[in-house]
Image (cartoon, rainbow, N blue to C red):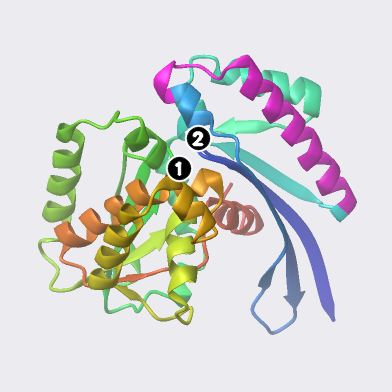
Amino acid sequence: MIKIKKYAAIDIGSNAMRLLVVNIVEQEGKETQFNKSSLVRVPIRLGQDAFTVGEITAENSDRMIDAMKAFNLLMKVHKVEAYKAFATSAMREAYNGKEVVALIKKKADIKIEIIDGKKEAAIIASTDLHHLLKTDKTYLFVDVGGGSTEFTLFSDGKIVTSRSFKVGTVRLLNEMVHDVVWEEIEKWIKTNTADFDEVSLIGSGGNINKLFKMSGKMQDKPLSYLYINSQYAFLNSLTYNQRISELGLNPDRADVIIPAVRIYLNAMKWSGARNIYVPKIGLSDGIVKAMYFGKI
């Protein structure tokens, strides 16, 4: 006997907003399956507002309301039973973030929770990492967003430590990350990985997923440091327009992909990792799983 539940997750990031609808398949004696039913991504770059002027502008607030109304209708059509909507870095830092949340609740009937970096890292880590983590190995999980990057160190299948830093793609594009932040990250990574012989990276986020897709590799195979480094040089050699026309990147991906790759490269360099694994996971996947297992 198969039982199917429908859950949804809304991830309001600094570069884009996503609605993920998942079919949760329960069958006696078998592991629960989480099958993606639909994913809608809307390129509203909230971080551009939040990190430069400190607020969500009226225009973007209106765009968010429209997007949330659409998300609400899509959830109704999909017959979603339960959902959670989480907002991250941009909404955390905009002084009118809470006002915008209240407005969306009133006009689009979507309840949004603004979460901190620690909770964000914990939700992402609650995804199906156990399938990927070889218990005798050490991994540095790096989730790069528009406003912040979450670093989580796993060893023996357990979380050793985690930390969120204010370094993200939109922030880097606007030249808002000072050298001292990079120095802090370097120190944190080197200090926490020093006791482990070999560390591999796990990369999460839209940019590394895109890079992985472009590599044509099988899902369980990692990308090497050399490959990432050569791709970084290649992307830098192209203009913004070339990255759109020749590589087929979305306009809101073609600029942020370069600072994102820079973050992953630095994390690999400072942890001594030679490889990076790229499972298809992110905050929205984590939200659905955390909801299902009663963690949020």
Q: In the depicted view, which residue is nearer to us: 277 or 4? A: 277
56 falls in the magenta region? yes
Amino acid at the residue labelled 1: Lys
Residue 288 x/y as whole percent: 64, 55
Depicted 199 relative to depicted 52: above or below: below
Q: In the depicted view, which residue is nearer to us: 295 or 268? A: 268
Depicted 77 relative to depicted 181: above or below: below
Q: Which residue is mark 1?
A: 119
Q: Which residue is mark 2?
A: 115
Considering the numbered disc 1 on the image, is that residue within a helix, a strand or a loop? helix
Judged left or right of residue 19, residue 287 is left
Q: In the depicted view, which residue is nearer to us: 93 or 213? A: 213
Instruction: State the extent of the magenta-drawn residues as a range.
Output: 51-77
Disc 2 crowd rating (10 Å Cα; few below 14, some 14-19, many 20+) is some
238 falls in the magenta region? no
Residue 269 in sight = yes
Judged left or right of residue 196, residue 109 is right
The quadrant holding residue 176 is top left
Residue 279 in sight = no
Magenta segment, principal secondary structure? helix
- Circles 2 and 1 in contact, beta carbons < 8 Å: yes
Amino acid at the residue labelled 2: Ile
Taking the spot 49% from the left edge, 60% from the top edge, the residue there is: 246
The quadrant holding residue 39 is bottom right
**Which quadrant holds the N terminus?**
bottom right
The quadrant holding residue 272 is bottom left
